Image (tube, rainbow, N blue to C red):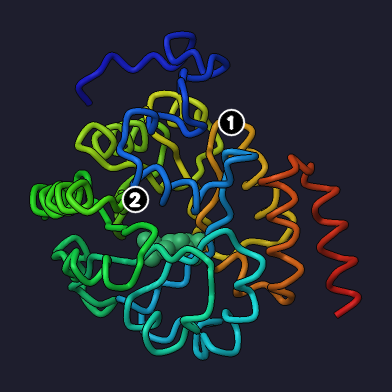
Amino acid sequence: MPEVDKAGERYAADQPQETPGFFLKGSHQLDWGIKNRLARVFSPSTGRTVMLAVDHGYFQGPTTGLERIDLSIVPLLPSCDALFCTRGILRSVIPAETTKPMVLRASGGPSILREELSDEEIAMDIDDAVRLNAAGIGIQVFIGGEFETRSVQNMTRLVDAGLRTGIPVMGITAVGKTMVRDAKYFRLACRIIAELGAQYVKTYYVDDGFETVAASCPVPIVMAGGKKLTELDALTMAYNAVQQGAAGVDMGRNIFQSEAPKAMIAAINAVVHKNARPKEAYELFSSLKAKG
Ligand code: R5P
């Protein structure tokens, strides 16, 4: 690693970065169109978002819980701040009447059948994102991966296209199958993604040092959920992430693979937008689940 790794006071995690004139970290000097799209994804009143991630099919096919997005996900649309999906699902399944902001997966290539997942390309023209009225686009960045340079370049090309058209880019820290997930890695990956122009970054939570990941990233971080946990553990992870500086979540499996997805997304909303504590949010989940 290029830095002397002494996590601690130099990150000043308790001292928020100033954002004069706009509510979102690192976004105050952007143009009106990008700011407006960001303000559709992130709530201006809390500065946070509950994005529902359902893009998994772009490399995994019909993932558990996403076999029928029309039946499992469309009913959840009123409960999220934004949906993260592919343009294929958007056009084929998501009703165009929805006013929810859509963030579109813009990379693809290798399927889950391949060992090396970093061999991705840009998988959507920016003109199509404009045509689809996208509120943002998202791309995987494989820092440390075999095709690191290409995936970084894919992202910077999208950032250029996004700046031309006013569409913010969410860079996603991809960990592949073998990379270590710790604060040191995510500090490196998130910072590179932000330095190279992404307007926000999606990354995973780590128990030790997440606040240094958030503090050293000059743009908002949203937390990916990862593999299915118990509901209480997932709510605790989301709580810890936002308390330690994340501007919300972009969660998938821990919502749509829950035994009660509607109750779970309501509980996540309480954690993200109302700072509900994990136990309180779990009680909300349990009571909503009991009501069916
Ligand atoms: C990200 O790269 C994936 O395609 C998902 O969007 C992401 O992993 C979030 O979903 P989950 O919460 O299921 O990990």
* Residue displayed at 50% across by 53% down: 40
Asked whether, in this view, residue 26 is left or right of residue 143, the answer is right
Q: What residue type is labelled 2?
A: Met
In x, y percent, where is residue 186?
A: 36, 37
Between 208 and 139, the residue placed more toward the observer is: 139
Secondary structure state at the residue bearing disc 1: loop
In x, y percent, where is residue 213?
A: 43, 30
* Residue displayed at 32% across by 72% down: 132
Say which mark, if any, is on residue 170.
Answer: 2
Asked whether, in this view, residue 77 is left or right of residue 233, the answer is left
**Residue located farthest toward the front when viewing the structure as drawn:** 32
* Residue displayed at 52% across by 19% down: 16
Between 28 and 52, the residue placed more toward the observer is: 28
Q: In which quarter of the image is residue 109?
A: bottom left
Q: Quadrant of residue 27?
A: top left
Q: Is residue 202 above or below residue 244?
A: below
Q: In which quarter of the image is the N terminus?
A: top left
Q: What residue type is labelled 1?
A: Gln
In x, y percent, where is residue 97?
A: 52, 80
User: Circle 1 is placed at which residue position?
Assistant: 244
Asked whether, in this view, residue 21 is left or right of residue 176, the answer is right
